[in-house]
Amino acid sequence: MNSNFKFQIENWLKYLRSLPDKKKKAILWVIVGILAVILGLFWIKSSISRFLNLGNELENVQLFSIENTETASWIKYVNEEYKFEIKYPEDAFSQEVSTSSAIDIYVNFQTNRLGLRISPWQNKEQYKTIEELISGEREKQVQEKFSVFGTIPQNYTEISLNNAPAIEWNTFHEAKGKIGTIIIALNDGYYYNIVARADPLDGGYLSEFTEENNKIFREILSTFKFLDKPSDLSKNEFSEQFIELTVWPDVTSFNFEEKSFYAKNLNNGDIVKVITKEQECYQCIITKIYSQSEDENKIIIKEFHDFQWLYSTLRDWEGPSLGFTVNGVKEDDHISALEIFYQIQ
């Protein structure tokens, strides 16, 4: 078979030699063209493969981790307790506000209606991945339990914040359009809730979150860094501050200016001070006060109230002291209540 093939090749070469020069050149160019097409196909295939690999590499690029020269002279805020730092322009100012999340850090502008809030929370649920965090917080919402993030939407973008896994989504208003951006990051025993909006977060009305707002926000976010040292939970004991108590409030101790009262801990007899929050503002953490009961199908029904209702109910209370449940955060001398409720028998 090989000798036959060799014989055919020799005959074909003899045939080519016998052809006029013009035909020889024509056949040569045809052969060159065929080889060029074959090589071109191989090159295209190789280029597509390299392009796809480049796309995969770009997906792993760490966002918001490169600081540009414009931010080099900005003011630096460093929080050693919650292990992060961030920079902001000189025409902005920062402030720390203690809340039930331990602390909120605000960055507001005097000349630009941009507000930025960073709230670190201790990862008491021990979420190992951002996916676990999303699933766990959504389950809380289904069970109508307290979640620091409110409602996490179905559509969000997975990003990386200084090498830590994070998610991001935009918030919208029916009349105003886009009004802000929310980012949740998970790192070193904490999760961080970062909220940016077009108005200072300590009050005001909602405005459109413009491209200029977004540009400044991205520049600030590019300076966000987690500190290298791990958090020392033995010092702040933050994990021990989330508590649940069964109490009986002292109706004579209600302070309507502070929205607080003293109560007897029915578990050990101690007297504790409870402070509630009723401030109405964007993404504020307010105390949920409600009564709950079960219908004939064992479905829990909640009826929500306010601080005045709690006082009136206790003032007019008749019967045994059944106890109110308080879920909250233990501060230095009081409990910041996240929920206060009692079970209707």
Image (cartoon, grey):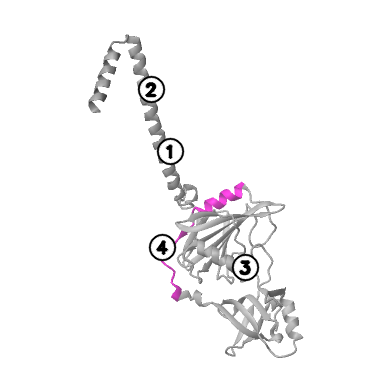
Looking at the rendered structure, the secondary structure element under dot 1 is: helix
Q: Earlier in the sequence, mark 3 or mark 2?
A: 2
Identity, as a three-letter code, of the amino acid under mark 4: Asp
Question: According to the image, label 1 marks what residue?
Answer: 48
Q: Nearer the viewer, mark 4 or mark 1?
A: 1
For the residue pair 112 and 225, the one nearer the viewer reads as 225
Identity, as a three-letter code, of the amino acid under mark 3: Val
Q: Position of residue 185 (x, y in %)?
A: 51, 60
Residue 133 left/right relative to 301: left
Q: Earlier in the sequence, mark 1 or mark 3?
A: 1
Q: Nearer the viewer, mark 3 or mark 2?
A: 2
Q: Which residues are magenta?
A: 211-234
Q: Position of residue 158 (x, y in %)?
A: 52, 54
Q: CA distance from mark 3 to mark 2?
A: 67 Å
Q: Earlier in the sequence, mark 2 or mark 4?
A: 2
Q: CA distance from mark 2 to mark 4?
A: 60 Å
Residue 80 left/right relative to 268: left
Looking at the rendered structure, the secondary structure element under dot 2 is: helix
Question: According to the image, label 2 marks what residue?
Answer: 33
Q: Position of residue 184 (x, y in %)?
A: 54, 60
Identity, as a three-letter code, of the amino acid under mark 2: Gly
- Contact (Cβ within 8 Å) of mark 4 with mark 1: no
Let me know if residue 259 appears in the view: yes
Looking at the rendered structure, the secondary structure element under dot 4 is: loop
Q: Residue at x 37, y 19 (%)?
A: 30
